Image (cartoon, rainbow, N blue to C red):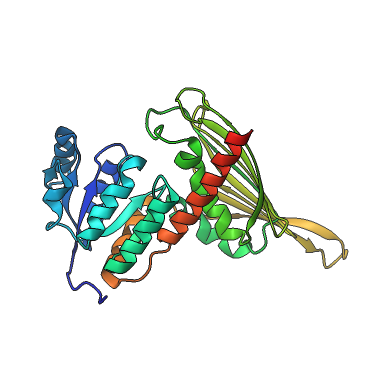
Amino acid sequence: MKPKEKSKIRVGVIGAGYLGKFHAEKYAEIESAELTAVVDTDFARAQKVAKRFNTQAFSNIKEIYHRVDAVSIVVPTSHHYPVARKMFNHNIDVLIEKPITVTIPQASELIRLARRKGCIIQVGHLERFNAVWKAVDKALSEPRFVEVHRLGPFQNRGTDVDVILDLMIHDLDIVMKYIRSPIKRIDSVGVPIISSNIDIANVRLHFNCGAVANLTASRVSDKRTRKIRFFQPDVYVSVDYDAKKAQILRKVINPDSSLPEIVGEEKAINHADALQAELEAFIDSVKTRRAPEVGGEEGKKALQVAHRILRRMRMN
């Protein structure tokens, strides 16, 4: 498909809840985008967000088919598949929040439909657009052990799915980006605390290459933590998402003593807005028709690992 000729991409936000209003805010700031619609079954909520950003509110997605070129789908996970399917059937490009869908067959069908219709499908794995990766990416070549903590206080959202699909899936995507090897074995444990789904979980992934990743996710902790550490031969990389800090430690040989020593460096992190970067990348893909960095296949791969983890938990 040829690049879209419009000077501005008409974009809508479907779902005006906690995250949806941030999507609307960012689109309103993107020069190459025009926010033309906010949709929510709670029309009063859609009106509130639409009024703030000087656009139109709707209660039914049927009302926006001719008003948009692209949409962000920011609704509960159980609605991702039917909403995205309707968008693709009307040749509308889609950014769909993670996880891509509830089931693997649903994800596969959306990928096939998007391909057949020539539509863009991007999955909202936000951490891919975090500025910390520009600072440490070149140092990560052969991780042998990865330690991840993603913890936070309970909030009454996202609880329609287990914490693996709500929070941990961000880190599964990052781990699989840097450890390019099939998973050999999974050890996992998780328990519900406040919601009826799993609220806290620990997972250990064993890869065919010998690497191991240990991930902990909780939505019932007393304070918020977003950290990931990589250990590889001669290099240690530590990332704190929230503090916008990264540290790289390397083993080097002291030229004077010929003995090994550890040399560390703090990396300066650009305090860029990850959501803004993600949505700008989506609009760029819509305009140029270039494949997004996190497309349907990447979203499906993260979902497949999450489902393997959940199956393993149910066996325990």
Q: Which is more toward the observer, 23 or 98?
A: 98
Q: Quick one: which residue is furthest to the top in this view?
A: 194
Query: Residue 280, image x and y in percent?
Result: 32, 60
Q: Which is more toward the observer, 29 or 266?
A: 29
Query: Residue 94, image x and y in percent?
Result: 29, 57
Q: Which of the 4 image quadrants contains residue 57?
A: top left
Query: Residue 164, image x and y in percent?
Result: 51, 40
Q: Is residue 230 left or right of residue 291?
A: right
Q: Quadrant of the N terminus?
A: bottom left
Q: How many marks?
A: 0
Q: Is residue 248 left or right of residue 95?
A: right
Q: Which is more toward the observer, 39 or 105?
A: 105
Q: Quadrant of the C terminus?
A: top right
Q: Residue at x 34, y 57 (%)?
A: 110
Residue 243 in sight here: no
Decide: is 27 above or below 151: below
Q: Residue at x 12, y 58 (%)?
A: 66
Query: Residue 307, image x and y in percent?
Result: 52, 45
Decide: is 49 above or below 7: above
Decide: is 77 above or below 248: above
Residue 179 in sight here: yes
Q: Which of the 4 image quadrants contains residue 129?
A: bottom left
Q: Quick one: which residue is furthest to the bottom in this view?
A: 2
Q: Which is more toward the observer, 199 or 283?
A: 199
